[in-house]
Amino acid sequence: MKKKREAFQGQRAIVLPRQLLSTQCSLNPALAPLYITDIGFYDKAKFHYKKRAQGADQHILIYCKDGAGQITLDGHSHLMKAGNCFLLPRNIPHEYHADNKDPWTIYWAHFTGASSDSLLDAAVKEWQGHKTFLRWSDQRIELFDKSFRQLEKGYRTENLLYANMHFWSFLAHCIYPEAELAVAPSHSATDLAIAFMRKNLHKMLTLQQMANAANLSQSHFSALFKANTGFSPIEYFNQLKVQDACQYLLFTTLRIKEIAARLGMDDPYYFSRLFTKVMGMSPNQYRERNP
C-alpha cells in the first residue's frame, strides 16, 4: 500500500493552537470537562495513512461516511465501512489508513478534557467495543459542522464555548444513536416497563406487574432493569412518583394527603417519608423553598 500523509483532495482541518488549549480550554470551568483539539473532514482520502506508535495525547473519533478503511488499535485490526464510527483512546498505539480502491470519506475529531476518559468508557460500554454502526443522520452531521464552522471564525471564548457545546451533542448522538429516535418508540424490556410505570403512577404496582409488562420473569426483569438504570424497579417507580409529586407541590394547592392519594398512597406519612428520602427534604419544605 502506498502511504502518504496528505495526498488527497477535499480535506478540511482545524488544529487548535496548543497554547490556547493549555491557557483557555483546560483552565475554563465550562470548557475543561471536554473540548476539541483538532477537527476535520476528508473526502475520498486516497492514501490517507497515520501511525502513532505511542498513541495520541487525545481521544480520536473517526466516522466513516463512505468508502472503506482499516483501523488497528493496540495490535487488533478493524475494517471500517460506511456508517462505522470508531473511538481511539488516548495513549494507545494505533494506525489507520484508507482503502486503496475505495478510499474512505471521514469526519474526525480529537478531543480531551477532565471528563473525556469517562465519556469514552461510557461509549465503549454502550457499543460493547470501540466500533459501532451509526445510521446516517443529517442532524448529527449538522452538529459536527456547527462545531467546525464556529472554530473557523476564531478562538474567542464564546466561539470555543459554542463549538464545544455542539460537540457534546454530536458525541451524544454518536454514543446513544437510538435516543434520537423519539418517533419510533423502543421495545426494550426496560423502556416497556418504564412506560408502564408512567401510565400507572396513580397505583402501587408490584414487581410482578412490572415484570409482566416487560414480558420477563421477576428475577430476569429485576437484574436487567438495574443493569440498565442503576436502580431496582421499585426504586425507579418511587422516583417517578416523587417526580410527579414535585409538580403537584409546585403548581397546585393540593394538601399532602391529597397528593399522596393521587399517587396511590393511602398513608400520607409513608408518602412524606418516601419524598424526604428521595429529595432530602419534606414535601412542605420543598413547597416552601420553591414558591
Image (cartoon, helix red, strand yellow):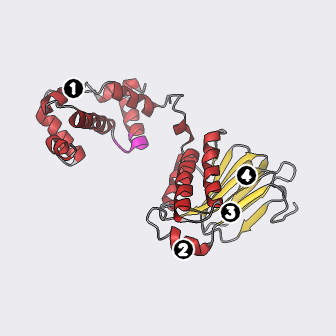
Ranked by sequence position, the earlier of labels 2 and 1 is: 2
Q: Which mark is residue 14?
A: 3
How far apart are labels 3 and 4 at the CA level? 14 Å
Q: Amino acid at mark 1?
A: Arg
Residue at 80%, 54% (x, y): give it: 10
Q: Secondary structure at mark 4?
A: strand
Which residue occupies the foreground of this view, 162 or 133?
162
Ranked by sequence position, the earlier of labels 4 and 2 is: 2
Ranked by sequence position, the earlier of labels 1 and 3 is: 3
Assign the magenta stretch its main secondary structure. helix
Mark 2 vs mark 1: give the one in front.
2
Residue position marked by numbered label 2 in the rendering: 22
Can residue 32 be seen by looking at this rendering? Answer: yes
Residue 230 belongs to magenta span: yes
The magenta region covers 226-231
Q: Are marks 3 and 2 in contact (CB under 8 Å)?
A: no
Q: Amino acid at mark 2?
A: Ser
